[in-house]
Image (cartoon, coloured by chain):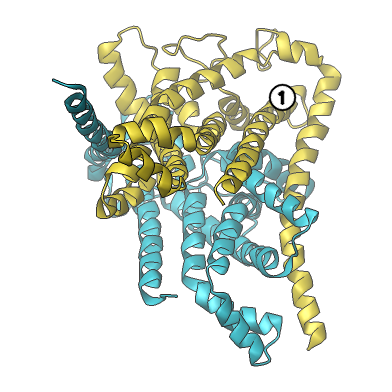
Amino acid sequence: MNSRQKNRIKDRAFKYLGIFSTSIGLILLTVFIGSIIKDGIGRIDWDFLTNLPSRKAEKAGILTALAGSVWLLVMTAIVSIPLGVAAAIHLEEYSRKTRWSSFLEINITNLAGVPSVIYGILGLQIFVRTMRFGGSLLAGAFTLALLILPIIIVTTREAIKAVPSSIKEASYGLGATKWQTIRHQVLPAAGGSIATGIILALSRAIGETAPVIIIGALAYVAFVPQSPTDEFTVLPIQIFNWVSRPDHAFVVNAAAGIIVLLAVTFMMNGIAVYLRHRWQNKVNW
Amino acid sequence: MKTKERIIEAGLKFSSLITVLTTLGILWVLLSQSLVFFGEVSIIEFLTSREWTPLFENKHYGILPLLAGTALTTFVAIAVALPLGITIAIYLSEYASAPIRNTFKPLLEILAAVPTVVYGFFALTVVTPFLKGILPELATFNALSAGLVMGVMIIPMVSSLSEDALRAVPNSLREAAYGMGSTRLQTAFRVLVPAASSGIVVSVLLAISRAIGETMIVTIAAGQQPNLTFNPMETVETITAYIVQVSLGDVPHGSIEYRTIFAAGLMLFVLTFILNNISYFVKKRYQQQYE
């Protein structure tokens, strides 16, 4: 066999190695999810979704955790969306290329890389202690909002950047002011991509566990939260709490909780992908 | 009209200032609390003592065991994610057809979208029992399972950033290599990977930073026992897992035990901050390279 044939064989072999590597992670994930569904699906019924937490594994439900997650998601969205989109508009449309703007840029990149536990520590000291929110939904929502703010800013900026300048120029040409142009031309044109980024950021927030543990969300909350100042727990904390118990019945509960959490996460990701796809097809610059 | 525009601009500007306030807040919280901590515990002991036992009777405040735990799980994770991630990047950018690439890229992103508490559950209830069948002396909580699963989670991070770097290499380099009779494999490893090396380095640095900061997988599967070891089969505790452990217990607010999480957090912040900044500047530089 000459060296050319050898090289061809190696080339071919690498292709299969590539296919293998690309699939292995997904195969593992399928195995993982399959085993969880096998463990937990039998546990999911109406009672599991609507029961309060209990010391008895068979009676325990996820109602308080589910309600806490929904509360936290809505409140985080209310805080983070306007701030994130506004910051992105400012950085992309208003700020000039100065040292300050490049500092802001490095700063946001850095914040996106700060581990989530650090945001938990920040939330603990600022919102829970200094502002005296305690381990309430309010403290949790502010903490998670700061955590996902960099993601929203970065994706929104990219969406705004993708809007062609011809649209803006046409708007200015008709006598519109800067804000009118942004409000009536740029934002509607970039809306789909902005929404995609926001949903992905929120789906990250709903799966976060560590920062919410650190600010003091409890594993055992006997009531559904009624207002933003109430104490709360969330689905990932409930799962974590069940995982760490030795009794196998609680591990089954954890598997069932994970199925619900994954269903919510994948649904949000699905919506985001769908939006992006639809927008790409509709708008062709 | 003009006042309205001004007010809106001020509002937008204030929103972007929140990001700066966040950074200042993080620095202030970590530094001010750590300063009090280092008033009671010498920084020399913190950095050199080989025991970390703030929650026990006989207290020692050496961060080394936590650093070792963090390094160990991170090392295992990178040992998984680096070879797989780069192979995937080369396959997707040089071998795969456009439809295959467009199908697999979003599928791989799913790996990064799964909540980490779920990965922790996998590691503890699926991977560890499986590995115990092969390695009977494996501890129930161990760095190996946690690291392996964390590696799977960060595959898409390495593969997508490396792929971007490979695709940014100008086609002329590819065509020149093919013109000389190179196969795709030779072109990839002798021309494209060296040309894209800074981008690949960035992807690895960011993956390391992510692995260092990862919390739930290691808390659930690697254990809560500070251990100065480099044996991945043993139970360890990472910096992040320690912070969660303290938060779950009822350590009185304002005590020195409570302040340990700020000192540990400062250590974590410094490590990830350095890695993130190096990758930011490397990225800025290679982006200019081909423009």
User: In what quadrant of the picture does the N terminus of chain B appear?
Assistant: bottom right
Query: Can residue B182 be spotted in the picture?
Result: yes
Residue A90 falls in which quadrant of the image?
bottom right
Instruction: Give left or right: position of B212 versus B15.
Output: left
- The residue located at (79%, 77%) in the rendering is B7
Which color is chain A depicted in?
cyan
The yellow chain is: B
- Residue A165: quadrant of the picture: bottom right
Q: Nearer the viewer, residue B277 or A256?
A: B277
Q: Position of residue A14 (x, y in %)?
A: 25, 31
Residue kind at label 1, given as amino acid type: Thr
Q: Nearer the viewer, residue A250 or B158?
A: B158
Residue visible at 70% across and 30% down?
B270
Q: Residue furthest front?
A: B180
Q: Is residue B24 above or below residue B142?
A: below
Q: Nearer the viewer, residue B173 or B94?
A: B173
Label 1, secondary structure: give it. Answer: helix
Residue hosting label 1:
B260
Q: Is residue B244 above or below residue B47?
A: below
Instruction: Say whether residue B230 is left or right of residue A98.
Output: left
Instruction: Please state the horizontal and vertical placement of residue A51, each as a whole percent of the image.
Output: 38, 50
Residue positioned most to the right = B39
Task: Report in which chain the residue with disc 1 lies.
Answer: B
State the image quarter where residue A28 is shown: top left
Q: Identify whether A203 is placed above or below B35.
A: below
Question: Residue placed farthest to the bottom in the image?
Answer: A174
**Which is nearer the eye, A220 or A100?**
A100
- Count residues near mark 1 (Cα–Cα under 10 Å), then give few for <14, some for 14-19, many for 20+: many
Residue A216: in sight, yes or no?
no
Residue A236 place in picture, x, y as percent: 46, 43
- What residue is drawn where x is 35% and y is 49%? B105
Q: Residue at image x 55%, y 62%? A: A158
